[in-house]
Structures are given as structure tokens and as C-alpha cells.
Image (spheres, grey):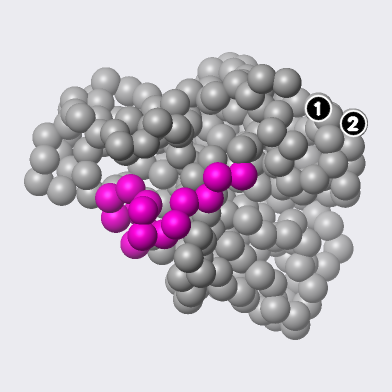
């Protein structure tokens, strides 16, 4: 089946004029963790659906200088220490309380794409203990995908997500869903920022949302005429 390139990844290609393919930044981590056991986290830059993961030294601009923040239930977020593994960064954390943890990245590259300011972000929840309703109120990124269906995700199940910006819903946001099988499809969220899709295959998925606005400003001492935001999340379907 033909891969449908998302608006998010299409715009991301403008960030790197010497590449003929699109890129995204995403976090990979299991949706469920175990108390007092190390939980592995990886961060990639490339094209998930086609299994293209760029070498870190070839990442665009200063994207590799991102900070990965860990939000522990009831505590202030902390920066996780990561190791460059060549085609990704790797690290881990050890849950010491039950509840929902969040892994978060927000990174605006120092270089503009023409006259456009770009901002990558990624947000992944990790449930430790008895599954609960995910409470995203503890994280308010400039753009994020909030999973409304998070427990025991299974093949054939209808999944829901909500697109928000700083805690407010984003109507008609463009969202693409990619499976590790190479399948991809683009959706548009409704007026309440809600997206529903069917998990057709087992395995990992990456969801990508994006917004674009003609708004002027200055970034790293350079003027821009428009701003783009893209955000990803990672899930695994059984």
C-alpha cells in the first residue's frame, strides 16, 4: 500500500534541503513500565514508516541538542541523561512510584527553513502499576497528542487521540498515523481536536500532528514570517 506522506513530514523536509526525503523526531518507549525496574527510552530522527533512522551527526541544524524531560507523578520534571548510539540517543529511568510518567521533548532548531520557524516536539506516556485514565494536565507543550485510548491496545481496536496546544484543543489539526509495516494515512481532527482511527496491524505506531501559521517574529536573531509546529507520540498495539 502506498505510504501517504503527512503534512508534518512534508514540511520537515524543508528543514534539510540536501535530503530528498522527509524527517520527524520521535521518542520510542514501552507504554508500560515496572516499579523499580529500568525503563528504556530511545530518541530517533528520520522516517519511522520506512525505518529510516539518521545518524546523529547528520541530524538537521542543532536538533541533536534537545533535552528529554521526565515527568514523574507528583514531582518536578527532570532532564534524562542520554547516550549517543550512532543512529539514536538511548537512556533509561527507574520508576519508583506507581502512576503515569511522561517523556517529553520540545526543540526549535536554531536555523530557519527559509522564512519559517520550526519546532519539533514529542510526548510519550508510560503507565506504571494499574492502568488509569491518562492525565495530560501535568504537561502543556506548544503542541501535543493526547491518547484517549491507552489501555491494552489491540489490533482492530478503534483508538482516539486529542490534539492540544498549551492545554487548549486544536481544531482541524492535521494528523498522520504511521505503522511500522510501512502503512500510513493522514487525518484531520474535528472541531474539538479529536481523532479516531482503527489499529489495522499489531506493533508500534507513530502519530504525527502539525500546525502552520503565517505569524512574524524573531528566532535566534533572525526574522521569520511563518511558524510551523510538529509533534509525535508512540504507541504499541498487541
Residue at disc 2, secondary structure: loop
State the image coordinates of residue 206 (x, y, percent, origin top left).
Answer: 64, 41
State the image coordinates of residue 147 (x, y, percent, origin top left).
Answer: 69, 41
Compared with 65, 209 (above or below) is above
Residue drawn at point x = 78 percent, y = 77 percent: 35
Q: How far apart are the two marked residues, 1 and 2, measured between alpha carbons?
A: 6 Å
Occupied quadrant, residue 37: bottom right
Point out the image quarter for the N terminus. top right
Residue drawn at point x = 83 percent, y = 57 percent: 131
Q: Are marks 1 and 2 in contact (CB under 8 Å)?
A: yes
Is residue 83 visible in the rendered structure shown here? Answer: yes
Q: Is residue 6 left or right of residue 61?
A: right
Label 1 neighbourhood size at 10 Å, few (<14), some (14-19), many (20+)?
Answer: few
Compared with 9, 97 (above or below) is below
Residue beneath disc 2: 156
Q: Which mark is residue 58?
A: none
Occupied quadrant, residue 196: top right
Look at the image and give the residue range highlighted in magenta: 51-65
Compared with 122, 158 (above or below) is above
Q: Which mark is residue 198?
A: 1
State the image coordinates of residue 88 (x, y, percent, origin top left).
Answer: 51, 61
Q: Is residue 226 left or right of residue 162?
A: left
Q: Nearer the viewer, residue 178 or 101?
A: 178
Compared with 37, 206 (above or below) is above
Q: Is residue 24 left or right of residue 187?
A: left
Residue at disc 1, secondary structure: strand
Residue drawn at point x = 74 percent, y = 32 percent: 160
State the image coordinates of residue 43 (x, y, percent, origin top left).
Answer: 53, 58
Q: Earlier in the sequence, mark 1 or mark 2?
A: 2
Amino acid at each position: 500500500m502506498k505510504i501517504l506522506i503527512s503534512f508534518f513530514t512534508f514540511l520537515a523536509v524543508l528543514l534539510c534541503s540536501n535530503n530528498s526525503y522527509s524527517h520527524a523526531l520521535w521518542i520510542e518507549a514501552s507504554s508500560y513500565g515496572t516499579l523499580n525496574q529500568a525503563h528504556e527510552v530511545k530518541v530517533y530522527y528520520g522516517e519511522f514508516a520506512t525505518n529510516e533512522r539518521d545518524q546523529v551527526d547528520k541530524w538537521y541544524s542543532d536538533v541533536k541538542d534537545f533535552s528529554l524531560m521526565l515527568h514523574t507523578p507528583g514531582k518536578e520534571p527532570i532532564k534524562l541523561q542520554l547516550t549517543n548510539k550512532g543512529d539514536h540517543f538511548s537512556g533509561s529511568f527507574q520508576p519508583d512510584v506507581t502512576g503515569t510518567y511522561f517523556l517529553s521533548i520540545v526543540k526549535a532548531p536554531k536555523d530557519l527553513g527559509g522564512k519559517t520557524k520550526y519546532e519539533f516536539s514529542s510526548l510519550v506516556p508510560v503507565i506504571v502499576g494499574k492502568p488509569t485514565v491518562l492525565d495530560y494536565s501535568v504537561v502543556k507543550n506548544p503542541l501535543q497528542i493526547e491518547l484517549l485510548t491507552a489501555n491494552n491496545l489491540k489490533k482492530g481496536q478503534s483508538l482516539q487521540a486529542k490534539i492540544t496546544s498549551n492545554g487548549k484543543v486544536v481544531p482541524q489539526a492535521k494528523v498522520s498515523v504511521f505503522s511500522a509495516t510501512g502503512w500510513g494515512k493522514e487525518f484531520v481532527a474535528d472541531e474539538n481536536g479529536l481523532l479516531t482511527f482503527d489499529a489495522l496491524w499489531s506493533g508500534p505506531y507513530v502519530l504525527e500532528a502539525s500546525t502552520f501559521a503565517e505569524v512574524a517574529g524573531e528566532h535566534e536573531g533572525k526574522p521569520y514570517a511563518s511558524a510551523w509546529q510538529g509533534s509525535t507520540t508512540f504507541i504499541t498495539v498487541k
